[in-house]
Image (spheres, rainbow, N blue to C red):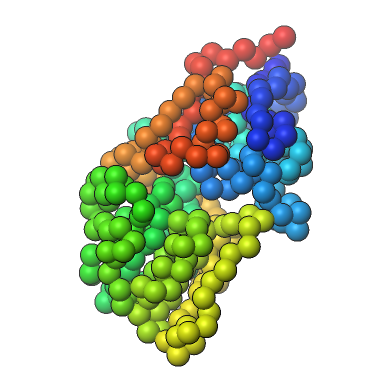
Amino acid sequence: MKARAFWVAEPGRGELRTESLPELGVDQVLVRTLFSGVSRGTEALVFRGEVPESQHERMRCPHQAGRFNEAVKYGYISVGTVEQGCGLENRNVFCLHPHQDRYVVDRTALTLLPEGMEPGLGVLAANMETAVNGVWDAQPKTSERVTIIGAGVVGALVAWRMQAFVDAPVELVDTRSDRKAIADALGVDFALPADAQSNRNIVVHASGSQAGLCRALELAADDGRIIEMSWYGDQTISVPLGEDFHSRRLTIQCSQVGAIPPHMRETHGFSDRMAVVLDLLCDHPELGALINSESDFETLPELMPRLALGASEVLCHRVRYPEEPPCTD
């Protein structure tokens, strides 16, 4: 049985490769992919060859093949339907798998989508997981004032989710004025950086830019917490920790989806977090507004450079797969 997979052949260039699938083993399933999603953050850094060597092992995804900054099969947003195995035939599933039209994985690698959930929404699961983790890391109190800088998918989802925990309106900040439409769709306030409200108890930074992080420090109230959700790869970022950083007792805290926040670990594991994510997506189909770009799997090699090197108008890009991909010699 054959499958086609997207590989970064070398930094800046992708291609589709044909691979042989292993025979189905005990407690394994064969999945036919329906959709995959392109991460505009981490996956773009991988495509550009900007993963620091010191992070090669930490950044491996579960079904990765090859090596970073060389030829690598990378990705972690796959939604498919089970064709064979474990009595799960025709169930829709989410898997942390690279872009590939069919694959064989252990049953434990899959998360079943809730019955009735539109499978195309599943490509938001990984970003929603990051957003849920970010809110957990921030530990917002109902009385606190919250701003999110960066209206990409993660930032928008964090802003949307924060509304459930605080009384005051949440503000979403971005340099692109057209992102106001997304804020409106999600029911949060919007501002350009120069117009953003100050004296904020929590500022979540998700813009992936040095300027955004510096603006986060400026907007924070005394004793404010800056939750850093951007990952910069091999870039060096300068942050102004002089002036009033210490006198205002500001805190910069990272949030990273690879670990459950310490205060949640006794009660929540990764499967619990994913259950929260899928319930949110199932109950709120309006979040599909964040998926504003789509293409066929066959075009991914031509499209990925634009997604990784620019295309700032794209929020979540969804990849469609053919209904009956070739599966035999």
- Looking at the image, the residue that sits furthest to the bottom is 247
Which residue is drawn at the image coordinates 41% and 49% (left, top)? 152
Residue shown at 53% from the left, 28% from the top: 303
Relative vertical location of residue 41 with respect to residue 200 in this rendering, above or below: above
User: In the shown orientation, is residue 240 left or right of residue 25?
Assistant: left
Taking the image as shown, residue 144 lies to the left or right of residue 50, namely left
Residue 114 appears anywhere in the view: no
Q: Is residue 283 left or right of residue 72?
A: left
| Location of residue 136 by image quarter | bottom left
- Quadrant holding the N terminus: top right
In-image side of 267 versus 259 (left or right): left
- Residue 79 lies, in percent from the top left, at 50, 33
Quadrant position of the C terminus in the picture: top right
State the residue at coordinates (23%, 69%): 168
| x and y percentages locating residue 259 in the rendered image | 58, 61
Where in the figure is residue 70, as x and y percent of width and height? 76, 39
Decide: is 65 above or below 60.
Answer: above
